[in-house]
Image (cartoon, rainbow, N blue to C red):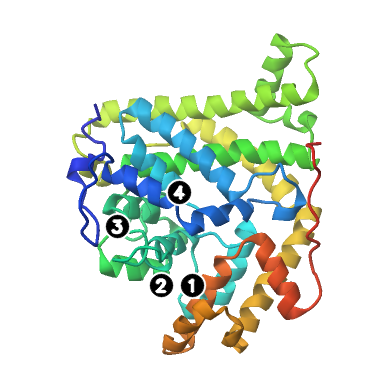
Amino acid sequence: MLAPFACQPTASHGRLHQERMSSFRSPFQRDRDRIIHSSAFRRLKHKTQVFVEHEGDYYRTRLTHSIEVAQVARTIAGVLGLNTDLAEAIALAHDLGHTPFGHTGEDAMGALMAPYGGFDHNAQALRIVTRLERHYADFDGLNLTWESLEGIAKHNGPVTGPNADAKHAGPLPYALAEVNADWDLELHTHASAEAQVAAIADDVAYSHHDLHDGLRSGLFSEEDLMDLPVTGPAFAEVDAFYPGLDKMRRRHEALRRVFGRMVEDVIAVAQGRLDAAKPQSVDDIRHMGTTIIRFSKPLYQELKAIRSFLFHRMYRAPSVMAVRVKVTQVVHELFTAFIADPSLLPPEWQEAVRTAQDQTALARVIADYVAGMTDRFAIQEHARLCGGALIETHQGPAFPT
């Protein structure tokens, strides 16, 4: 039984292109399955979070991250009486629009596309699921339900209107504006509770696994985490229960406690806020004027301290920054090469080039192509087209260190 404020499959706004209902899957289950079977989802296995794909086999990729986000989202949604299939679908789709090389690649693409309508990975994810995936006979994209598209567009909050985050100031990214023109996603409201769960699950997952990856990389040690909130008490608890535990087990036991603390906090806060607000429909959630699924204020402040630590010790570590410079150059030079000579694009992209009516349309075709590249393919194409290998493509260690 779903809560009254959950997204009910029978009350879905449907799909832009009408289809027959499945006899054994709900609309949101079909969305999830289409996302998993998409080409863009498969490419996530060779797109990275922080480290470049070749640097090691045990760091998270966008694919493993998305699976972890989906697992957290299903757990939280199930406890709250929400639609777990919709929460999972949005979680699995939330990173489809990311460029190669993580946020560094997105920053580079954003600068390149600034004259052509901008670039945003959430907007690009919508472009992928509505236009760029081309496997079905009756439509472009995946023909997802309105609720899934809404969740991809605004799981982090309203994109327009008085409640929009300041980072959304200015015109909408063109990819989002195009989709919204076809089908109004009510960008001024909050998203469903399921989409909000997917957003907080993203925060939980990366807060946990960036600590794990940072330790594995050697950018900081367990001792560095003893002085931080949440992580310090977690390691102290493990040491009290399991004195002398070997390093890898100690690390895992401590970080799983950090993970559990975040999930339990989100569930407790959500239950309290839902009990107080007593929403009776999903539209009550959308028009509440505030996010209903969030961390408590004390934990949010503690996580800010951890994120500040990660920013300085991991995201802006000298070794990471050196690679950021190189991958930024890779994205810039690939984009520039294709703009100068679109015939370098593969044959299957030439029809899009021929129908591009101006430089802006051409730039968007090239952005679609470059943004869809994996880390490995971008490095290889850069070496082939631009000469020289800026980044070695050797494989990482065979075993974790």
Query: The residue under label 2 is which amino acid type?
Result: Tyr
The residue to which callout 4 is attached is 36
* Marks 2 and 4 close (CB-CB < 8 Å): no
Instruction: Looking at the image, tell me whether mark 1 or mark 4 is earlier in sequence order.
Output: 4
- Residue 174 has which mark? 2
Instruction: Looking at the image, tell me whether mark 3 or mark 1 is earlier in sequence order.
Output: 1
* Marks 1 and 4 close (CB-CB < 8 Å): no
Measured Cα–Cα span from mark 2 to mark 3: 17 Å
Measured Cα–Cα span from mark 2 to mark 4: 25 Å
Task: Please give the name of the residue rendered at 69% of the width and 31% of the height, measured from the top-left corner.
Answer: 228
Q: Give the side of residue 26 with respect to residue 294, left or right.
A: left
* Nearer mark to the viewer, of 2 and 3: 2
Task: Please give the name of the residue rendered at 39% of the width and 45% of the height, measured from the top-left corner.
Answer: 89
Measured Cα–Cα span from mark 3 to mark 1: 20 Å
Task: Please give the name of the residue rendered at 29% of the width and 50% of the height, measured from the top-left corner.
Answer: 147
* Nearer mark to the viewer, of 1 and 4: 4
* Marks 1 and 2 close (CB-CB < 8 Å): yes
- Residue 188 has which mark? 3
* Marks 2 and 3 close (CB-CB < 8 Å): no
For mark 2, does the 10 Å Cα neighbourhood hold few (<14), some (14 to 19), or many (20 or more) residues? some
